[in-house]
Amino acid sequence: MAADTPVASLGQQDFSADEAEIYTLRPSDVVSVTVFREPDLSVENIPVGADGMLSLPLVGSLKVEGMTTRDLERSVTERLAKSQLIDPRVSVNVMQFGSHLVTVEGSVEKPGMFPFKPGTRLTGAIALAEGLKREAKLSEVAVFRQTKEGIAVAKFDYGAVRAGTMLDPVLLPSDRVIVGTSGLSLFWQDLIKSLPAFALFTRF
């Protein structure tokens, strides 16, 4: 069995091997809202605004960031009922996880920014970049993450991750993965080499 328990002594307590059971909406996610037998009140492929708001016919603007799809269904149903619509029935589906982007750089075959589904792991991000180059330094893979306190960075031994002896962490939106290589700038090489050997987040 692959390692799935964070080791506090190695600074892995901020990571999880499990996908969140409940998905909450974020800006740039695209949803469809269907009101049964009310096509004029239904909308398809409407994005959540950068401010976390969603505007719907007859309902108006709603702050949906942080809501689940069921939360949004209940909120829209309540508002439609107050507008005297009889027995409104609402369903909400996430059509695109627009908020979920990961940047992969360094010694990978196809560096770039990629959309990913919730629950994708570090190995998935590298697969999106079509795998590692031969000169990739497996012990020098860093994940940069935006937190409330600032940018945090963790270092992983990717060989251990693939072998199942180290946690393969679930990605968060806007994570940035850098795979070590001699082709990186001296700044990145020195920064990655200076990090702990395991997944210890460091803020700077």
Image: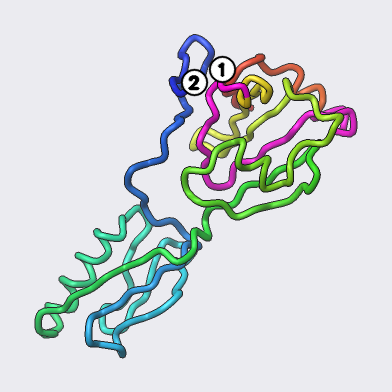
Does 180 lie within the magenta span?
yes
| Residue type, numbered disc 1 | Thr
Q: Earlier in the sequence, mark 2 or mark 1?
A: 2
Q: Is residue 97 above or below residue 42?
A: above
Residue situated in front as seen by the camera: 63 or 16: 16
Residue 159 picture location, percent across and down: 68, 22
Callout 1 secondary element:
loop
Residue matched to label 1:
165
Image check: 41 left or right of 148?
left
Residue situated in front as seen by the camera: 148 or 28: 28
Taken as a whole, is the magenta stretch helix, strand or loop? loop
Q: Residue at x 58, y 21 (%)?
A: 199
Residue matched to label 2:
3
Does 169 lie within the magenta span?
yes
| Quarter-of-image position of residue 63 | bottom left
Q: Is residue 170 above or below residue 48?
A: above
| Quarter-of-image position of residue 21 | top left
Q: Are marks 2 and 1 in contact (CB under 8 Å)?
A: yes
Q: Total number of numbered labels?
A: 2
Residue farthest to the bottom, as pictured:
40
What's the magenta region? 163-188
Q: Residue at x 47, y 14 (%)?
A: 7
Image check: 189 left or right of 123?
right
**Which quadrant holds the C terminus?**
top right
Query: How dense is the environment of label 2, judged by Cα within 10 Å: few (below 14), some, or many (20 and up)?
Result: some
Callout 2 secondary element:
loop
Residue farthest to the top, as pictured:
9
Query: How dense is the environment of label 1, judged by Cα within 10 Å: few (below 14), some, or many (20 and up)?
Result: some
Residue 54 picture location, percent across and down: 38, 70
